[in-house]
Amino acid sequence: MEFANPYLLALAAAAAPIGWMVLRRRRAGYALPDAAAFAALPASFRVQAARMLPLLRTVAIILLAVAVARPRIGDANAIVPGQGIDISLSLDISSSMTSSKLGPDRNRLDVSKEVIREFIKGRTDDRIGLTVFQKDALAVAPPTLDYDALDRVVADVKSGILPDGTGIGIGLATSLNMLRESSAASRIVILLTDGQHNAESISPEDAADLAGALGIKVYTVGVVTNINTPDADIDEDLMRAIAERTGGRYFVADNPQRLAEVYDEIARLETSAVGRENYERFTELGPWFALAGASLLGIELLLAGTWLRRAPV
């Protein structure tokens, strides 16, 4: 048990002088030359009860002081999830992602999956989903807070599960559809690709317009061979335009470290509106102490005004 306002326990000290003053008070009586004969006479129950009235008042004051100090018992720790962001990760798994390197010894898809998994581990309170695309797109995992399960899904992603190609428009549109019914205060898509749109499906421009209409921000990430030279394999102007139309940004990476920095920067740009709040749920005991104190005061007043009113003390 603990007290919400422990400093108010000092009010209980008021009971000490009150009790002492009451117990010290004596009624006026007749002077007798010798009272020894009366000393051996036992006090009646009524007299003994009357002498206990100051004790009732003292205990009542202590109980009321404890009540205003708010004694309570902690039941359990509770966590209020913060108001997070709904994120859809749109990942290019076309054949070029596995046939081209990002760094000296790993292909682009493996590095991208590793970076995405680290990005997921660093989030809190954000629902994250995953879409993969080649010529077509597939919603692999809906937005979830189960980061462990999502991590396993990302780890198992492989190229070749869809017809080969690079459908940037359909990949983005599938992620937008995943977030369309979301009520989160902020919704974003992070789309990663290493190629140009070449699929006969919804155009990236139309998908970007749809994102703007839905109020969903799109961050585009281009994986290139060399960040300092133009890359013919990726349409950077298109990627930049998609991001700008939706209030997002375009990033480019040519090595694992730079790709990790890109996702770290997006993480800093998109933080949860409200963090987690921890609090402890309590059972308040103050009302019971107040009831007990008030009851004792009521009993003391009732007895002093009725049965014990004329009892000598």
Image: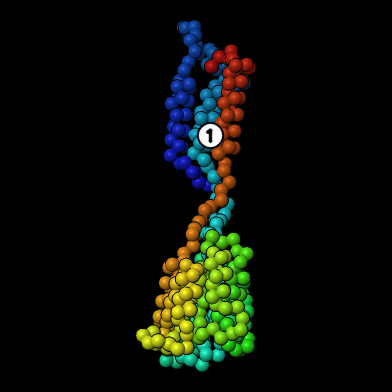
Residue at 43% x, 67% y: name it: 269
Quarter of the rendering containing residue 203: bottom right
Q: 200 and 283: which one is in front?
A: 200
One can see residue 144 in this view: no
| Viewer-nearest residue: 190 or 128 | 190
Which of the 4 quarters of the picture holds residue 229? bottom left
Give coordinates of residue 154: x percent, y percent.
Answer: 56, 79
Residue plotted at (51% across, 85% down): 196
Q: Of 147 and 194, which appears nearest the observer?
A: 194
Instruction: Quickly name the residue at label 1.
Output: 63
- Report the front residue among 27 and 145: 145
Farthest-out residue, left: 228
- 298 versus 41 height, above or below: below
Give the residue at x 40% y 80%: 258
Expressed as whole percent of the image width and height from the top left, the position of residue 260 reads 43, 78
Residue 73 picture location, percent across and down: 55, 47
Q: What kind of element bears circle 1?
A: helix
Vertically, is 302 above or below 204?
A: above
